[in-house]
């Protein structure tokens, strides 16, 4: 589209020239009609025109230009809905991204985002689904900064602070240098006018003059390289004022001792060519010996490699020359040695975030190449695999807290401070009270409700309970309990283990056989490990089941024969192998309802085939005592179907109790066969819930019981 059409009075021409698949005609007509009627606009016409012009220099596709135009009209999505005009999905995504960016700006303005600018930047990138939104917000911010002189001083300061904290670093890490340097200089001029003017007066030329000087140097260097037959890419830039000031602060030097106010970069194919170019540069201009650094022979700790030298260039002015291979350049720009990692002090935020940044930079490079080849829509591709691996939640004051994916509100509390986690009693998310197991999403605002004394719970360490997803949080809880004396830990571990084994029907099991499994020497060591969360009750239960399998079944009374598989029972009974017997009906006993994975034994009935029981089942023990010859060794086969299990829950009768229970069952994929509630006589407002459910295996049963007991108001959950 024609840049001339983007003059303040020419928006109609700009809208008409956008393709219909990028901006449908009814939407363009609505925009024009509302704008001409004086509908509220986000920016002055000249700022919008400048924004579109900047996007055009970045080779933005028509969809991006259309989204920037539409977003300038306040509540454009509401107006489109009222007019029954459908927004294309990709255009809607771009508009949603700009809304998300506006929320980040509001957080920065209202809550002093300068305290955690990196968190703000990562929150923005996490909220934006289509990264083509980023060039729009950068272009708009640059246009606003250029026109900031119209604003009151306080608004100028707020706009400049946001530019310094968020926009300029984003432009830097995306490699949009032509925006980055201007954003930094404009913000610096407003925030520190005295420093800006001092450095500007110290420079021996204007920026335009320095750019002309760099162009002359590049022509001279290219001619010298061509004369020697060296294939190289040569580029250069004058250092901008903000960058000069930062280097003066970092090195504690006056401006006269900085030798890289003007810099040239040479890219070649291999390392020998790097040193050949270095010799040519030193022959062309007089080198400054103290300013030579060989980062190829001695790379920086972050892996950065390059040759740096400073020379006395034309007109007696100092000039820095950087020489590297194209591979080194790619690593420094997109890899672990990227400039922004050490210049901004940004911490790594996960592989997915780095992938988003790298992908965005490559997308911009491809856009420039495609524009050169005449491609009208170079920014169409969106990488669907860019899944964020971090969560960025907000404190009530608007500070960003960086958490791993799957983090809960309790993880959030421990990320704030260990003692906040220890004292955590509840939480509100966006003003709504949620359980401590609530999994956070990016952008949610969290308020932690604390008690006066630290009282962390040991079941927070149980992975199956779902309280903590972060290993750092679990370490903080574990460290708290490590401070307690050994006798206390043994007592707590016994209580925790007995509670879980009771509900799994293993309360009186002997713990001695499983000690070797965990490399422990005594039962007390096991109890301490359970109390500290190093071993879970579910692991102990599983070990007890496996240890009990060979000893749980007496020798068969029938003649020995090679093991053969029994016929499976009716659907839902699971597949059980009866050793030494074939063609027998096998059914799971209703009295104890064993699950796949549990130790089992069989009893040969007179009319119903083999009945499969748990070894500690009272009915089985009674039958086996009368006729031990009917006891058969059985085991679960590979194909295991879900089993029907009866559960008993005792809880405080509260609003939404049954809803919370059924929601949990649905989340775990448990099929409910029946549910019945009765009031308890022992006290008012307490109920007993009988639940018939189809459980896949013993592991799922343990997880279900643990999650049920973690629900508010639930006092106990166990097998009936």
Image (cartoon, rainbow, N blue to C red):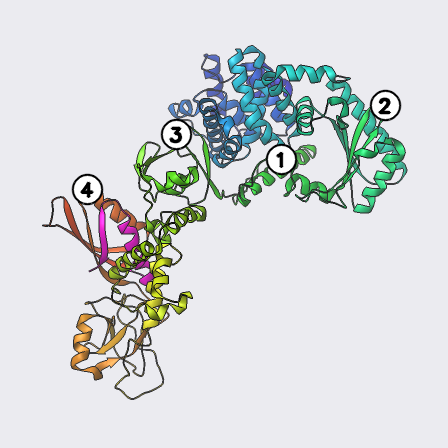
Residue indicated by mark 4: 654
| Among numbered discs 3 and 1, the one appearing first in the sequence | 1
Task: Specify whether 43 is left or right of 541.
Answer: right
Contact check, label 2 and label 3, Cβ < 8 Å: no
Task: Specify whether 341 is left or right of 313.
Answer: left
Magenta extent: 695-720
| Among numbered discs 1 and 2, the one appearing first in the sequence | 2
Coordinates of residue 310 in the picture (x, y in percent): 80, 32
Q: Nearer the viewer, residue 465 or 288?
A: 288
Q: Is residue 623 above or below residue 541?
A: below
How far is the residue under mark 4 from the one under mark 3? 29 Å
Coordinates of residue 332 in the picture (x, y in percent): 68, 40
Q: Is residue 519 above or below residue 50?
A: below
How far is the residue under mark 2 from the one under mark 3? 57 Å
Residue indicated by mark 2: 316
Residue indicated by mark 3: 396
Coordinates of residue 71 in the picture (x, y in percent): 49, 23
Residue indicated by mark 1: 340
Residue drawn at point x = 41 percent, y = 44 percent: 407
How far is the residue under mark 1 from the one under mark 2? 32 Å
Contact check, label 1 and label 2, Cβ < 8 Å: no
In what element is the residue under mark 3? Answer: loop
């Amino acid at each position: 589209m024609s840049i001339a059409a983007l003059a303040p009075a020419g928006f109609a021409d700009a809208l008409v020239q956008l393709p219909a698949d990028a901006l449908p005609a009814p939407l363009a007509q609505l925009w024009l009609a509302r704008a001409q009627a004086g509908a509220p606009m986000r920016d002055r016409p000249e700022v919008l025109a400048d924004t579109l012009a900047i996007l055009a220099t970045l080779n933005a596709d028509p969809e991006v230009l259309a989204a920037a135009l539409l977003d300038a009209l306040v509540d454009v999505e509401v107006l489109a809905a009222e007019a029954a005009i459908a927004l294309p999905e990709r255009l809607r995504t771009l508009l949603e991204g700009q809304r998300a960016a506006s929320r980040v700006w509001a957080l920065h303005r209202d809550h002093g985002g300068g305290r955690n600018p990196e968190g703000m930047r990562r929150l923005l990138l996490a909220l934006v689904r289509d990264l083509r939104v980023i060039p729009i917000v950068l272009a708009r911010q640059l246009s606003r900064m250029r026109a900031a002189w119209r604003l009151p001083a306080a608004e100028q300061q707020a706009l400049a602070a946001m530019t310094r904290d968020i926009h300029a670093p984003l432009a830097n890490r995306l490699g949009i240098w032509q925006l980055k340097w201007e954003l930094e200089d404009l913000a610096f001029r407003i925030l520190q006018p005295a420093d800006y003017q001092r450095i500007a007066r110290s420079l021996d030329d204007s920026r335009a003059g320095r750019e002309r000087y760099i162009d002359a140097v590049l022509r001279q260097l290219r001619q010298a390289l061509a004369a020697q037959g060296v294939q190289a890419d040569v580029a250069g830039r004058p250092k901008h004022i903000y960058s000069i000031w930062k280097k003066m602060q970092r090195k504690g030097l006056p401006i006269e001792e900085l030798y890289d106010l003007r810099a040239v970069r040479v890219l070649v194919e291999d390392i020998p060519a790097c040193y050949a170019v270095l010799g040519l540069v030193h022959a062309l201009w007089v080198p400054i010996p103290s300013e030579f650094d060989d980062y190829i022979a001695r790379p920086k700790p972050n892996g950065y490699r390059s040759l740096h030298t400073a020379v006395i260039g034309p007109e007696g002015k100092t000039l820095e020359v950087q020489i590297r291979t194209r591979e080194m350049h790619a690593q420094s720009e997109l890899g672990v040695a990227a400039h922004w990692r050490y210049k901004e002090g940004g911490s790594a935020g996960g592989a997915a975030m780095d992938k988003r940044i790298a992908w965005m930079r490559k997308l911009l490079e491809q856009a420039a190449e495609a524009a050169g080849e005449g491609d009208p829509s170079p920014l169409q591709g969106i990488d669907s695999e860019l899944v964020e691996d971090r969560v960025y939640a907000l404190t009530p004051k608007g500070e960003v807290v960086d958490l791993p994916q799957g983090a809960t509100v309790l993880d959030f509390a421990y990320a704030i401070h260990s003692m906040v986690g220890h004292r955590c009693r509840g939480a509100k998310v966006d003003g709504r009270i949620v359980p401590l197991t609530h999994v956070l999403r990016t952008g949610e605002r969290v308020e932690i409700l604390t008690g006066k004394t630290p009282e962390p719970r040991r079941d927070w360490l149980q992975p199956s309970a779902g309280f903590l997803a972060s290993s750092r949080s679990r370490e903080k809880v574990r460290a708290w309990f490590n401070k307690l004396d050994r006798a206390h830990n043994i007592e707590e571990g016994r209580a925790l283990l007995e509670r879980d084994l009771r509900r799994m029907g293993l309360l009186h099991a002997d713990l001695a056989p499983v000690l070797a499994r965990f490399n422990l020497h005594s039962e007390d060591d096991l109890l301490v490990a359970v109390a500290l969360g190093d071993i879970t009750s579910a692991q102990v239960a599983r070990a007890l089941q496996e240890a009990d399998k060979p000893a749980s079944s007496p020798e068969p009374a029938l003649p020995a024969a090679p093991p053969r598989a029994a016929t499976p029972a009716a659907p839902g009974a699971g597949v059980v192998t009866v050793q030494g017997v074939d063609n027998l009906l096998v059914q799971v006993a209703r009295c104890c309802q064993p699950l796949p994975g549990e130790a089992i034994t069989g009893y040969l009935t007179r009319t119903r085939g083999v009945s499969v029981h748990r070894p500690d089942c009272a009915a089985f023990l009674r039958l086996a005592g009368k006729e031990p010859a009917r006891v058969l060794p059985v085991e679960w086969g590979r194909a295991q179907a879900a089993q029907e299990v009866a559960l008993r829950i005792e809880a405080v009768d509260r609003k939404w109790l049954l809803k919370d229970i059924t929601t949990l069952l649905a989340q775990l994929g448990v099929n409910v066969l029946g549910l019945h509630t009765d009031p308890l006589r022992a006290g008012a407002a307490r109920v007993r819930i009988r639940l018939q459910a189809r459980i896949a295996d013993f592991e799922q049963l343990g997880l279900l019981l643990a999650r049920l007991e973690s629900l508010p108001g639930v006092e106990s959950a166990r097998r009936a």
